[in-house]
Image (cartoon, helix red, strand yellow):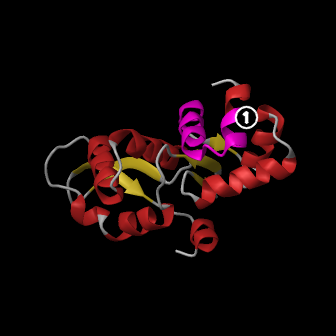
Amino acid sequence: MQADALRKLAEAGRFEELAHALAQAFPQGLVGERDALVTFLVNKVGLSHADAVRVADALEAAGYAHHLPGERPRWIFTSKPVSLRALMRMLDQEYAEFVGEGDEDPREEALRFIASRLGVDREVAEEILEGLAAAGYAEVAYHAATERDRYLFKFPEIFAMTYRV
């Protein structure tokens, strides 16, 4: 999507459409520290700094934009609002029990978990999983207890401090 179209969505406060466009433009997230989203909105979209801060805050408050701090920091965008804090708790507390004994593809299993627990469709689950993997929060690894590969989710301490999980 062109910068003009993104600017029009942002200025009109059409945050769901803006978030969907950002999710498509950055399937693995917008790489950078916390200020990267504002910088992008100013430098690439053409918003004033004050408007960029307002839009970034609104996207985050509505659950469309989530900053993942850590070694590979980035913003991930979802076309539907989600609670990243709730997802992290569910992944930490419920995912191990959700993982089946069968030979289901680890990606499909993780997508099914995210979609079912957050009540989102597959597209949004993919947006979340791609962002988590790109930020280093999710990876496929062999799990000895189930004797197969599955997604492992790990959250750096900076995430817990940032989101008070």
Residue at mark 1:
7
- Mark 1: amino acid: Arg
Q: Main secondary structure of the magenta part?
A: helix
Q: Position of residue 155 (x, y in %)?
A: 51, 63
Q: Residue at x 49, y 61 (%)?
A: 84
Quadrant of the rendering where the N terminus is positioned:
top right
| Viewer-closest of 117 and 71 | 117
The residues colored magenta run: 7-27
State yes or no: residue 11 in magenta.
yes
Q: Residue furthest left?
A: 102
| Viewer-closest of 47 and 85 | 47
Residue 68 appearing in the image: no
Secondary element at image label 1? helix
Residue 114 appearing in the image: yes
Q: Position of residue 23 (x, y in %)?
A: 54, 38
Q: Position of residue 149 (x, y in %)?
A: 28, 47
Q: Residue at x 16, y 44 (%)?
A: 103
Lateral position of residue 20 relative to residue 121, left or right: right
Residue 53, above or below 103: below
| Viewer-closest of 72 and 60 | 60
Lateral position of residue 118 relative to residue 138, left or right: left
